C-alpha cells in the first residue's frame, strides 16, 4: 500500500517552507524534494534534481498525493 504523504517539490525555498509549516500545523505527513536540504525541515528533506525525470519519478511513485 502506498503512503499518504505530500511531496513538496522545491520545498526548501520561501514558498515551499511556508507550505511545509501549514502542513505540519495540520498534521499532514509530507516530504521535501529539492536541490538543498530545508533549513526548517531537514529530517524530511531529500536532495534531488527534479530536472532528472527518472529520479523524480522514483521519488514520487512512493506516494499517492
Image: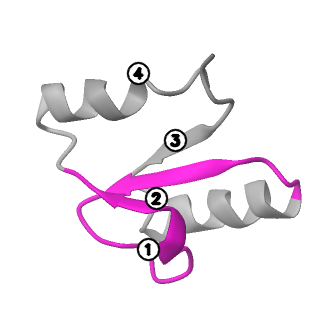
Residue with the most extreme bottom position: 39
User: Residue 37 at what x, y percent from top left?
Assistant: 35, 73
Residue occupying the point 52% across, 59% down: 16
Q: Residues within 10 Å of mark 3 (few under 14, many from 20)?
A: many
Left or right: 5, with 54 as reference point: right
Disc 3/disc 2 C-alpha distance (Å) = 9 Å
Please identify the quarter of the rendering in which residue 22 is found: bottom right
| Cβ atoms under marks 2 and 1 closer than 8 Å | yes
Mark drawn on residue 61: 4
- From which residue to which does the magenta span run? 26-48
Q: Earlier in the sequence, mark 2 or mark 1?
A: 2
| Cβ atoms under marks 3 and 2 closer than 8 Å | no
Left or right: 59, with 26 as reference point: left
Whether residue 39 appears in magenta in the rendering, the answer is yes
Q: Nearer the viewer, residue 16 or 26?
A: 26
Mark drawn on residue 7: 3
Q: Secondary structure at mark 1?
A: loop
Disc 1/disc 3 C-alpha distance (Å) = 13 Å
| Cβ atoms under marks 2 and 4 closer than 8 Å | no
Residue occupying the point 22% across, 51% down: 48
Residue on which the image places disc 1: 38
Residue on which the image places disc 2: 11
Q: Secondary structure at mark 3?
A: strand
Q: Quadrant of the C terminus?
A: top right
Amino acid at each position: 500500500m502506498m503512503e499518504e504523504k505530500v511531496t513538496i517539490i522545491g520545498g526548501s525555498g520561501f514558498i515551499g517552507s511556508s507550505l511545509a509549516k501549514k502542513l505540519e500545523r495540520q498534521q499532514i505527513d509530507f516530504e521535501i524534494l529539492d536541490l538543498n536540504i530545508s533549513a526548517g525541515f531537514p529530517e524530511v528533506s531529500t536532495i534531488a534534481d527534479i530536472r532528472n525525470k527518472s529520479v523524480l519519478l522514483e521519488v514520487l511513485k512512493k506516494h499517492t498525493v
